Image (tube, rainbow, N blue to C red):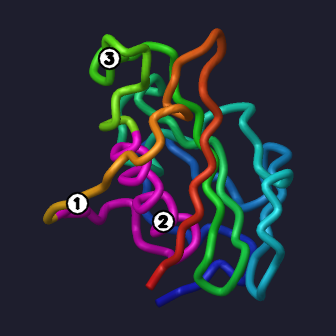
């Protein structure tokens, strides 16, 4: 499996007019290869990643903003959850829809596969199921600003 050790997203066929950013573009600091401290300050929340990197048709559907490698197969992934969304609406308790969490995980898996492991953008992904439990709903509470989210991911 190709790696991102060169610091660049591998060249893959793209739909007409689309480009893939090189790792480190847009002022984002990415550590390629080797172990690095899990330093959340290296993550950017300024703009979403390109929509084709997470298999989404609209920018409004992209929640990921950045990802950095923290070890050989470990990553931090930044996302920003909207206060409201057409599909993932807040609950009556004022908390973000838990499915927003699942969609963030899905986008993370797709993005990491393309950006760090060289999986071609033409490949499709199939999920067979997932399960999670919200043990502390407090971080899901919606406030006056979009919610910044950081996921710790490990590719096994």
Residue in front for this viewpoint, 127 or 52: 127
Dot 3, crowdedness within 10 Å: few (<14), some or many (≥20)? few
* Residue hosting label 1: 130
- Magenta residues, dominant SS class: helix
- Left or right of 147? Residue 5 is right
* Residue hosting label 2: 114
Q: Secondary structure at mark 3?
A: loop
Dot 2, crowdedness within 10 Å: few (<14), some or many (≥20)? many
Q: CA distance from mark 1 to mark 2?
A: 21 Å
The x and y percentages for residue 67 are: 65, 57
Mark in front: 2 vs 3: 3
Q: Quadrant of the C terminus?
A: bottom left
From this view, report whether residue 105 is shown above or below residue 46. below
- Of the image marks 2 and 3, the number of the one nearer the N terminus: 3
- Left or right of 7? Residue 4 is left
Dot 1, crowdedness within 10 Å: few (<14), some or many (≥20)? few
Q: CA distance from mark 1 to mark 3?
A: 21 Å
Q: Are marks 1 and 3 in contact (CB under 8 Å)?
A: no
Identify the magenta region.
Answer: 101-127
Report which quarter residue 128 is drawn in. bottom left
* Residue hosting label 3: 91
């Amino acid at each position: 499996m190709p790696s991102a050790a060169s610091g660049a997203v591998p060249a893959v066929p793209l739909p007409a007019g689309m480009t893939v950013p090189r790792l480190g573009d847009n002022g984002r600091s990415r550590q390629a290869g080797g172990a690095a401290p899990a330093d959340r300050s290296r993550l950017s929340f300024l703009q979403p990643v390109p929509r084709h990197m997470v298999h989404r048709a609209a920018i409004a559907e992209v929640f990921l903003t950045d990802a950095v490698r923290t070890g050989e197969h470990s990553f931090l992934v930044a996302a920003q959850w909207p206060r409201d969304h057409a599909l993932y609406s807040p609950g009556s308790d004022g908390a973000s829809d838990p499915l927003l969490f699942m969609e963030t995980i899905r986008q993370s898996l797709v993005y990491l596969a393309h950006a760090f492991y060289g999986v071609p953008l033409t490949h499709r992904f199939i999920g067979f199921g997932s399960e999670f439990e919200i043990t502390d709903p407090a971080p899901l509470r919606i406030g006056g600003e979009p919610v910044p989210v950081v996921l710790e991911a490990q590719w096994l």
